[in-house]
Amino acid sequence: MTAPGASGAMPEEVFRALKRLMVEYAHGVDTRGDPEKVVACFTPDAAIDFSSVGFPVMKGEDEIRAFYAGLVDSMAFEFHIAANPRAEHWDGTLGTISSYVMGMGLANNGDAISVQVKYRMECVAHDGAWRCRRFTLDAMMPLAA
């Protein structure tokens, strides 16, 4: 069985693995205890681009680790719901999936955060496991003022 993708049919086992990687990423963010759980989802040279919601572009493990360590320090609670995962691309080695995500949080200063975004993860096999090498998100709804 295969999942449809823009360039070819993504094998079902790859699609399941990439969905699981997205779940592990969200779980790592939401549990907030250990930024290494999030870093482990990415290749050492990964790039993350959250500029559509006002966050910096991050490149490499050190910048990714620093960003998520800052979230651990600044957020009291976080919660993400991913829905409608979709295989977007498969070329035999690179798999890309997307999902709509609702994210909620409460910062330590009391500010409530709510975002509705689309995750897009470009993934490759790295050291025997699927890892994200490029992660972007696009705002699906205007950010609260």
Image (cartoon, rainbow, N blue to C red):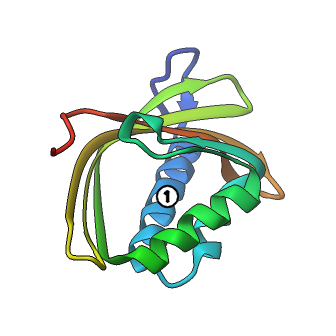
Q: Measuring 47% from the left and 50% from the top, which residue is drawn there?
A: 19
Q: Is residue 4 left or right of residue 114?
A: right
Question: Residue 48 appears in which quarter of the rendering?
Answer: top right
Q: Is residue 81 left or right of residue 87?
A: left
The residue located at (52%, 70%) in the rendering is 70
Kind of residue indicated by mark 1: Arg
138 up-or-down from 36: above or below: above
Q: Residue furthest right?
A: 127
Q: Quarter of the image holding residue 100?
A: top left
In the image, residue 73 sits, relative to residue 84, either above or below, namely below
Total number of numbered discs in the rendering: 1
Residue 131: where, in percent of width, then height? 67, 52
Judged left or right of residue 140, residue 98 is right
Instruction: Residue 128 in the image: state x and y as whole percent.
Output: 80, 58
Q: Residue 73: where, in percent of width, then height?
A: 47, 79
Q: What is the secondary structure assignment of the residue under circle 1?
A: helix
User: Closer to the camera, 73 or 48?
Assistant: 73
Disc 1: which residue: 20
Q: Foreground residue, 56 or 20?
A: 56
Instruction: Please determine whether, in this image, residue 135 is positioned above or below residue 102.
Output: above
Front in this rendered view, residue 78 or 7: 78
Quick one: quadrant of the C terminus? top left
Residue drawn at the location 75% of the way across and 51% of the way down: 60
Neighbours of disc 1 within 10 Å: few (<14), some (14-19), many (20+): few
Location of residue 72 with respect to 14 vertically, above or below:
below
